[in-house]
Amino acid sequence: SISGRIADTMSTSTKNAPPPMKQTDKMPGDVGDALFRLISCFPEVVGRRWLSVNEMHERLIISGVDEDLEVDHIKYILQVRNKNEKFMKRNQFGRGYGGSSKHTTYYRCTKYTDKATPKTDHWTSSSRPERDIPYPDEGYFDNMRECSTDLDIVNEWLLGGYLEVLEAAEKAKEEAARAAAAAEASAAAASSAASNQKYGGSREVGGDGFCITHIGSRRNFVRDASAHTSACGGGAEMVYCESVGHGSSIWEKYQCSKCDYAATYDTCSYVNTDTASRGRIRSRKQPETNIRIIKSAREAGVNLSKARELFTGAGIVMPAYRNMLEQESKIREVIESLSEERLEQNRREHCAAARRVPDYHGDIVWRDSKGELRSTCRGAACMDGGGLTRAYNHRYKGNQAAFIVISLVTNMPIGIVWTNNSCGKCIRALYKYQRSGNATSSANYMQHMKHGGVCYRNSKCGPGTAEEPSAEQAAEEFLLNDAGEYRGDDTAIFLDEVVSDNDTRAPNKFIAKQAEIIGENAWRRFSPLVTVSAA
């Protein structure tokens, strides 16, 4: 497993270190060519400037390429794929800094190598060494349809796979070639036929496949188109012009054969979600069917890749897998915020219900670290923890664990602690450090596992040992918030009766942690009431 490889790597010395892994940062040729095409799509104000590798990397990330793209990737394709300056022109410029002369290699797309772009235009002026290179708009490639296929190829490779995108691109090229041949044949037949209509009769473009259609959109289109043809009269008809697919939706354009009236048919509407996907500042419009498919798959517990295989196997148009992952990240953000709100509501209901019990002994009164007097509700709950993917020989093979506390008054969950001791980005950063040749000792491996973005490793404990530290964390969360402040008398909970299976010391850890927080005096006052029951 991945966690086992990390443990073995960190426990070895330099002398017995394992051989370096395969150079996964070497881009395949198709991915490198796609990245060159993306660079050539930069706005002209950027593409005409000479760019260093680092400047090129910054602008690619801003334009929509995944953050996992590294400078070494660009260096590799410039060295291997740019033979005879096929894609990028190469040049070196010197500039004095403090009496010394530095030479840096700069590159520019071959389509801008004309006399209007001199070799020295990368400096703002001859007297100032600072460079003034403009940046493209954030998500520039996402808004350009001609860049969508190349962007998917590069980002899918950075995420671990791209063959599916390449096959889809080749299939799209074949279908476009067939559609172009059919259009030429149709145009030739229309030109040879005598017709007084503006567009030479109707043009039908056949297509294989199916799509999900909103019933109301179809009805509205038919109603509007029929109303116009009736009003226009004289044998007017709506002639098919073009269609564009975006995600799971299809946009088609029809134009009247007698006038300039045009009607468009969208299989669904485009919506903006309130939550932006991870790594994005704002949400962009998406087809409504995209969001509905992701939401339904999440609620039904269906894996996204399997859901996509189901629809594509039936011939139904579906969005790219990367787009589905981005939409799922929105749903995860929403679920996380809703779960916190639901837990807060469950704790409030527990406190209200516990105080209404006839034999309730009253709140526990104590002083917090600031010296303020607090009155906390007491109650009973059951708790247990479990790890992910337990094998038949009672060994845990997974990396995640959960600890759940359920109220015995309302029978609702009032505490959930999730732990994960593995992160793919941490592992990638560690392997990169090992391949660099600078790994001298396993003692400093942890500091080289840092990376940008979200880190999914929030615990050092595996699923077999995470129950006890998770119990301490839950005990603290019942009284204090993330800032270490008191939650409030209406949501803070002190458990004076704990029900557990007693297979670990988690209940004792829970009780001891809450006793440490409320103080010794309050604990001794109510200690006869605190019990541990074995389920």
Image: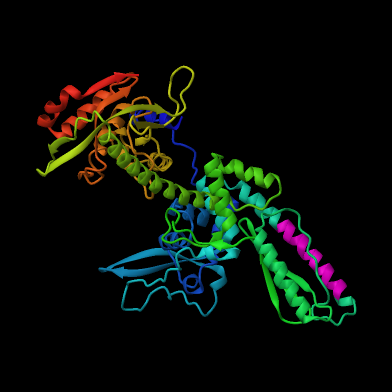
Occupied quadrant, residue 95: bottom left
- Look at the image and tell me whether residue 86 can be seen: no
Q: Position of residue 120 (x, y in %)?
A: 43, 75
Pick the front one: 410 or 38:
410
Left or right side of 267 for 19: left
- Look at the image and tell me whether residue 75 can be seen: yes
Left or right side of 348 for 389: right
Residue 185 within the segment the image draws in magenta: yes
Could you tell me which residue is drawn at 41 percent across and 31 percent down?
Answer: 3
Q: Position of residue 34 (x, y in %)?
A: 57, 57
Left or right side of 177 for 47: left
Q: Position of residue 267 (x, y in %)?
A: 65, 61
Pick the front one: 162 or 515:
515
Pick the front one: 106 or 329:
329
Main SS class of the magenta portion in the image: helix
Could you tell me which residue is drawn at 89 percent across and 76 percent down?
Answer: 192
Could you tell me which residue is drawn at 33 percent across and 27 percent down?
Answer: 382
Occupied quadrant, residue 387: top left
Residue 513 within the segment the image draws in magenta: no
Could you tell me which residue is drawn at 36 percent across and 39 percent down?
Answer: 457
Q: Which residues are magenta?
A: 173-190
Q: Quadrant of the C terminus?
A: top left
User: Does 445 appear above or below 255?
Assistant: above
User: Does 469 appear above or below 42?
Assistant: above
